[in-house]
Structure formats: C-alpha cells, structure tokens
C-alpha cells in the first residue's frame, strides 16, 4: 500500500496541472492531464481530469492547441475564397461545411440554385455523412479495445473516398461547392459507382451490428455510461446524434429543410436513452437513413445546369445572413455580417463540436476513468471543429 | 429463477461473441475478399482519376507555346498567395508594346489544391496534374516556375 501511494504521489507531482498539489497520499484528489498529445483524444485536446481514486470528479477541457483563427482569416478572403478554409474545421464532413457557407452566400445574393446542383449537393452531403460515421464507428470501437472494426470501417469508407476523388478531385477536403452550385458536373461513372456502393454497403452494415452493436463487452461498456438527460442536452446546446440520443428532435434537415431534404423521405432517428449506447445507435441508424436518401436521389438527378450564372466578383448587400445545416456532428451555423464589400465584415461559425464538448464535464462526473473513452468516443469530437 | 437468468445471460454473451468471431473468421479464410493496395509496389499500375488535384501545371504544346496571357486572374483568385505572375512588355511586329507573361511563379508549399485558379483562368492555360509525391528535403525545391524557358504565347490567344 505504501509503495502504491508513493507511485501515485510521484506521478502526481509530474502530471499535475499546478495549484492543486498534494492530497493524493492521504486518499485525496489526483489531477492528471490527458492530452494534448494522447492517443485517446484523437487530436490535440487537453483534458485536466480531477480524480478521486478512479472516479472522475471534474474534467476541464483546455482548448486552443489547433486554433488557426479561421473566422479571422475568412474576413480577408472573398466570398468565393473563404469556402475552402471551412473544410479545415470539421475535416470529416468538409463537404457539409462548404455547403453551409455556400448556402449563406447564396442567401445574401438571393441566388436561385439549379435543381441539378441541389440534388448533387445533397447526394454528396449524405455520402460524406456516411464516411464520417464510418470513421467514427471504427475509431470508437478501437478506443474501446476492439481493433478489427477499424479496418472494416475503412474498407467501406475508402469506396466513398474513391467516388469523391473521381467527381470532386480530392478525397477529404473536396472544395466542390461554389456559390451558385457545384464546381463541376458529376463524373460519368458517378451514378454507377454510387449504386455499386449502395449494394456493397447494404451487405456490410449488418456486419457492423454483428461485430460491435450486439457484442456483450461493448454493450456493458456503453449502456448507462455518460447519461445526458433531455433537459441537459437542450441547455448545453447539444445537437446532432448527441442531442438526438437524448431524445431532442434537433435534425436541421427535418426542422429547417434546405435544398431537397423536404422532398425525400427519411426518418429522424431519436433514442431516449441518453447514454453512450443510445448515441451509438443513433449514428448506426443514421447511416441506414443516409443510404435511403442516396437511393432515392441517385436515379433522379434532374438535367440542366450544375452551376448558376454568377458575377466574377461577388458582393453581398449590407446586412446579416445566417444559414444552418446538419453536419455529421450536429448543427453548423454560418453567420455573415456584410458591409457591402467583397469580403465579409465578420464571420461566426456555430460549430457543433464545441457545444457537444461542453457537456463532457457534466456527463462524466462520477463515472470511472475507463468510461471516459466511451463517453468521448460517442460525443464524436473533432478537435479542429472545436478550436476553429 | 436466478439460475435461469444467469444461464441465459451467459448464453447471450457467448453467442454475441461468436457472432462477431464468425464475421472475422469469414474474412480470415477468404483472403481474396481483403482489399489492400500495396502502394509503393503498385505505382506502375496506379491510375489516379483525371480530376485529381495534385499540383498546378501549365500545358505547353509541341512548339513550346502556352496560353497564359499574364492577366493575373489566377493570382487574384488564389486564397493564400500561392501564385505570383511577373509580366513584361513585348513589342509586336506592328511596333506596339504588349503585356506578356515573363515568369509564372508557383509556391507548391503554400498550395492547398482548391482549384480556384484553374476555374478563374479565362484561357485554360493552367490545369491540375495528377502527381502527388511531392516530398523533398529542401523547401526551396517546391518553388516552381511553370512556364518553360523560351516559351511564348500561342498565336490567337487573347
């Protein structure tokens, strides 16, 4: 026993965030740092965790390690140029971020988007959502000790990346959206390859359930862990699968439909559990719904222009414009204040990751440190999205 | 009752684990279904899609002529100052002075491959190439001059 306390004590002195020293030897609090460079945080997130034994007392996230001042950068870029920067926020749903910015600029210009561009945008959005959820699924299972699902997830994700590469020209930061439509028309092979992917994915998603969803170890590690009640989810501003896992209907695609989301039929997945397992189920079921949207649209891409005619230099009228979309992680809002010039006066992004992270301290208090991986995994944090 | 529940729990747990093992076992005995690209070895057969954005290049024809008029539209479209166009004044056969391209400076180390310069180009002088193995030991090697030495503007391009 003496030896054990000594080890903890020496560890404490090295790892402590300062100020809170002492106390570990007499059974008091222990402060440890997780991150900024830590394999479990998937990015440069720094968590200062106060422990009582193995129980988490308090978590204090320290942000800013990947702050690139994207909002400030956007102020010096024109309305065509600033869209590409937003790919670097939530890089896993880069396409949906670009979509939000394009929507906001179009709202300012009062531009009518050709129907073909609308359908292409939604198709790309949903493919991005599936790719993002696949990566989350693999990475989360890996956090909880299951290594194999990571490869299974990346196998299907690779197919989407190849489709993106062929049509958009890049695998991750596509920059396919331009104000007024999309950059190029879809590739001649696009429809065939997406149909192949639908067939492949419908077979493979059942494997996911066999591998992880039904697994008893996984269920025991996630059920009842990190419970976020409906009231808390609303007050913390949690959106996306985190909010819907707590029973809050917050799907922007249903509440404020943009593009063609009001014309396709899909279900808003709502689970009432509020625990990590509920959040997990929401994402797994959302993948099936995304496939359903893609299935409905892939044969019904209308003919016509893929880009509306725009002026060479875009100028937004004086005023304030706001647009919101549902990314893979929740609600992304883009707020532009324009003074009538070629560059925005001020841009604010309401990123879903920041609000979802704010609930981390609340929901992990009282749980064991091993459960933190399950909680952070199901919050699906993308650090560049939090810091911007 | 307790015993019955206990046994059913154990049965459920074991069957869920076996179900997962069945999936992994399926791929274990069918190595052909595994898709792994042996990247550096398959370089010869590898074919990237034509739209893939690797780096900006300027296309020259057989007479060493390009289509760049030096209008700086790409320089203005670039969000992070990757392109710098240096122009000069040529004398036309009629004795008039005409603006022409002297050097097309391209900083590959700053480029994010956003394709905005290619979209902006009115004469399609530049395009994206499918090369992607850009790593070098010296940063200065990434500073490129896109127009070939001795090249000139193709006749008829305004």
Image (cartoon, rainbow, N blue to C red):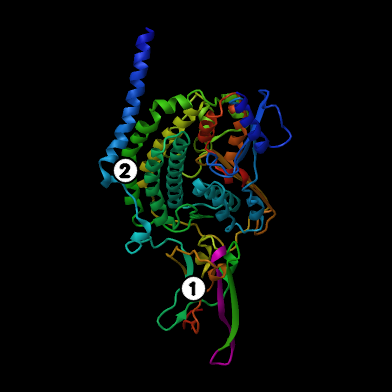
Q: Kindly indicate whether the residues beneath marks 2 and 1 are on one polypeptide chain.
A: no
- Residue identifier under label 1: B123
Residue extending farthest right: A19
- Please tell me whether mark 2 sits on a helix, a strand or a loop: helix
Residue A365 image point, x, y percent: 61, 26
Magenta segment includes B95: yes
Q: Quadrant of residue A214?
A: top left
* Mark number, residue A16: none
Residue B95 vs A110, above or below: the answer is below
Residue sitting farthest toward the front: A3
Instruction: Chain letter for mark 1, please.
Output: B
**Local crowd size for mark 1, using a 10 Å CA cut-off: few (<14), some (14–19), many (≥20):** some
Q: Is residue A285 left or right of residue A82?
A: left
Relative to residue A299, is residue A331 drawn left or right?
right
- x and y, in percent, of residue A57 in the image: 64, 26
Residue A79 versus residue B88 in the image, above or below: above
> From which residue to which does the magenta span run?
B92-110
Is residue A359 visible in the rendered structure shown here? no
Residue B78 place in picture, x, y as percent: 57, 64
Judge whether residue A385 is colored magenta: no
Is residue A348 among what the camera can see?
yes
Rendered residue at 36%/53% (across/down) = A190
User: Could you tell me which residue is drawn at 29 percent across and 40 percent down?
Assistant: B27
* Residue underneath mark 2: A200
The quarter of the displayed image where residue A357 is located: top right
Q: Which residue: 57% across, 58% down?
A: A80
């Amino acid at each position: 026993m003496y030896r054990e306390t000594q080890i903890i004590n020496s560890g404490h002195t090295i790892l402590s965030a300062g100020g809170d020293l002492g106390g570990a030897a007499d059974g008091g609090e222990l402060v440890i740092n997780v991150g900024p460079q830590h394999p479990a945080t998937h990015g440069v997130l720094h968590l200062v965790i106060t422990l009582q034994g193995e129980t988490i007392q308090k978590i204090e996230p320290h942000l800013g390690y990947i702050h690139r001042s994207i909002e400030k950068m956007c102020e010096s870029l024109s309305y065509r140029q600033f869209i590409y920067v937003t790919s670097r926020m939530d890089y896993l749903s880069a396409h949906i971020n670009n979509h939000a910015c394009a929507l906001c600029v179009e709202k300012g210009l009062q531009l009518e988007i050709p129907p073909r561009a609308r359908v292409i945008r939604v198709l790309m959005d949903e493919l991005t959502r599936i790719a993002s959820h696949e990566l989350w699924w693999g990475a989360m299972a890996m956090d909880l000790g299951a290594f194999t699902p990571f490869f299974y997830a990346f196998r299907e994700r690779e197919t989407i990346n190849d489709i993106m590469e062929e049509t958009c020209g890049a695998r991750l930061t596509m920059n396919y959206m331009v104000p007024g439509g999309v950059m190029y028309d879809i590739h001649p092979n696009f429809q065939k390859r997406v149909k192949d992917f639908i067939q492949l994915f419908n077979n493979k998603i059942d494997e996911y359930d066999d591998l992880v969803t039904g697994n008893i170890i996984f269920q025991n590690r996630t059920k009842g862990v990190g419970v976020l009640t409906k009231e808390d989810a609303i007050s913390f501003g949690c959106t996306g699968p985190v909010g819907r896992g707590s029973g809050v209907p917050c799907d922007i695609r249903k509440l404020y439909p943009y593009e063609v989301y009001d014309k396709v039929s899909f279900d808003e997945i709502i689970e009432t559990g509020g625990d990590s397992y509920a959040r997990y189920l929401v994402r797994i079921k959302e993948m099936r719904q995304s496939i359903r949207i893609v299935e409905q649209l892939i044969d019904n891409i209308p003919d016509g222009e893929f880009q509306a005619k725009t002026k060479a230099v875009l100028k937004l009228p004086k005023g304030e414009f706001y647009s919101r979309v549902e990314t893979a992680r929740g609600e992304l809002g883009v707020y532009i204040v324009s003074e009538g010039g070629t560059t925005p006066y001020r841009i604010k992004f309401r990123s879903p990751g920041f609000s979802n992270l704010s609930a981390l301290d609340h929901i992990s208090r009282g749980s064991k440190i091993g459960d933190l991986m399950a909680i952070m995994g199901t919050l699906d944090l993308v650090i560049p999205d939090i810091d911007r | 009752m307790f015993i019955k529940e206990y046994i059913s729990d154990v049965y459920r747990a074991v069957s869920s684990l076996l179900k997962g093992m069945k999936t992994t076992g399926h791929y274990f005995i069918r190595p052909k279904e595994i898709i792994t690209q042996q990247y550096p070895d398959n370089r010869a057969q590898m074919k990237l899609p034509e739209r893939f954005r690797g780096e900006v290049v300027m296309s020259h024809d057989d007479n060493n002529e390009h289509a760049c008029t030096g209008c700086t539209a790409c320089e203005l479209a670039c969000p992070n100052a990757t392109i710098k166009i240096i122009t000069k004044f040529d004398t036309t056969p009629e004795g008039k002075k005409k603006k022409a391209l002297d050097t097309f400076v391209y900083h590959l180390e700053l480029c994010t491959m956003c394709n905005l310069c290619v979209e902006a180009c009115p004469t399609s002088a530049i395009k994206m190439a499918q090369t992607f193995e850009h790593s070098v030991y010296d940063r200065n090697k990434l500073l490129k001059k896109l127009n070939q030495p001795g090249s000139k503007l193709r006749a008829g391009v305004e």
